Image: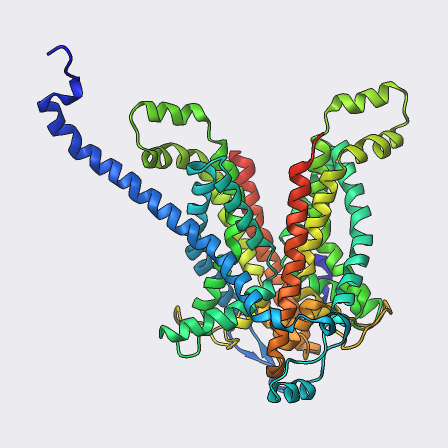
Amino acid sequence: MDKTNILLDKKRTEVIPDSFIGRNGRNRVFLGVVIFFSILTISMVFLIIGTMLFKGYHQINWAFFTQTPPNTFEAMMAKSAGNIIPGGIVNGILGSLYLVAIASLIAIPLGVLIGIYLYENSSKKYAGLIRDITDILQGVPSIVIGLIVYLWVVVNITKGYSVLAGSVALALMMLPLIIRSTEESLKMIPDSLKEAAIALGTPYYKVILRVLIPTSFTGLMTGILLAISRILGETAPLMLTTLGNPAINWNITKPVGAVPLLIWQFYNDPNMVDLIWSSSLFLMGFVLILNLLSKWIGARRKI
Amino acid sequence: MVLSLVRGSMTSIHEFGWKFLISSDWNPTKGEENYGALLFIVGTLFTSILALIIALPLAFSTSLFVAEYFRDTRMASIVSTLVDLLAGIPSIIYGLWGFYILRPFIVSIGLTPQGYGIFTSGLILAIMIVPYATSLSNTTIMMVSNELKEAAYSLGATRLEVIWNVILPNARSGITASYILAFGRALGETLAVTMLIGNANIIPTGLFSTGNTMASVIANQFGEASGLQLSALIEIGLLLFVITTIINAVGKFIIKRFA
């Protein structure tokens, strides 16, 4: 008798199993539900990327990267002859790079400087205000940013759709991301490092340039790459500021093409459907690679 | 920024006053121009709320998967990377996918004849906001202290009971805030919705009805707009700005208050 477990006692087992199986069963069902919905969520990624790959790959060729898009008539002729659509999206690729480059030129120095300011004066009144404004800016829908930049730049400065307007819009979207990531990565630097530099009598600007920025460099890069990958695919603000251009353009006060804008144009033109998928594939591939690259850098960072 | 929006919409504010908010008549015909934003406001709220409802189980399950059930495993990091990729896909690509894949699917199961409408846009929006809803709730779920959970386990609680009685009450504010912020995202989404909602200037009557949202009317009509219409569109932009800012402020307030 002394070896019998108390749980195996007849009278007890009659009571315990009922409720225990019920609770345990519910526990398992819930786990099943969680796994089901999680799989549903991540399967969306594969569905979307798979569609792009499947429908877009056959249009990717040399011309795709070197030529400007055909007009509707050419596309229609090629399609009725059973060929792939001639031409490519080089104006969009160059335009996108151009826009992103100018936007980065505006947003990166400004964002990093503001980030450093917030880090150095984190408890001052102005810092709180700037932080709130950054938060608000981050929450503003992209189309509203487009509207605002339209009123600022398109109407007043360039008197027409332009590269500059598009870049300012993209820069406004990059700014909060860069400010945030700069501040966060500076916060992760141990104080002892800074104090050591100051103890050596280093002037403060040198502490910032030689100690703070190099140590947080990977963090800054992660933030910048993420910000670029966010704005590369932005379409709505560009529709209101750069409009698009069927030819290659380097003039900063004139409209320029961009990959997302071209996708929008192809979407509105039934003859160009095939080009949509390859352009989207290209855009998404580019964005996702940047995204993963920034994750990779972020994961490798050590201080 | 607010100032320039207000200045741009001055003509329209003068012309319509408060009627802009409650009128649902949007008529750009020359001579009898009349603009009211109500139908866009209703459309925007309708699609976004629907998106939030659909995204809720998806985001909640994914958070639990990453932050509780499979926490710190390889699987969890793969899942969270994939969910982050969802956030990286540009809006216009969601729109295309919705238009060419989701819309025919909805037609084929016979929900609506055309596939456009509130339901389709809500579905796409839901997928788009899942990563925003998960990222913050992941961290709050992970922050629930281990002692509390262990105490519950030691009392014989099952995992579900721990989640329900320990994790949820403790992480409630963070989870709520993350859904509010995701809702703010959904309000401002433009192109994916523009491509799927049908762009009919009517107040949506049901789940499968077509409609229009604030962001998509700006995208659609901005190119041809001038004068009073342009001003009315800018006023819609101003409204959208105000609404999203309030929603975001509420979300941030909840985080600050309870964190």
In-image side of A177 versus A117 (left or right): left
Q: Quadrant of the N terminus of chain A?
A: top left
Residue found at x 85% / y 29%:
A207
Q: Quadrant of the C terminus of chain A?
A: top right
Residue A137, compared with residue A203, is above or below; it is below
In-image side of B180 versus A140 (left or right): left
Image location of residue B116, percent across then percent down: 46, 74
Residue found at x 85% / y 18%:
A199
- Asked if residue B9 shows in the view, the reply is no
- Asked if residue A113 shows in the view, the reply is yes
Instruction: Please name whichever residue, B226 or A272, is drawn nearer the observer in this view of the structure.
Output: A272
Image location of residue B39, percent across then percent down: 50, 71
Q: Quadrant of residue A59?
A: bottom right
Residue A224, compared with residue B22, is above or below; it is above
In-image side of A43 versus A233 (left or right): left
Residue B57, compared with residue B170, is above or below; it is below
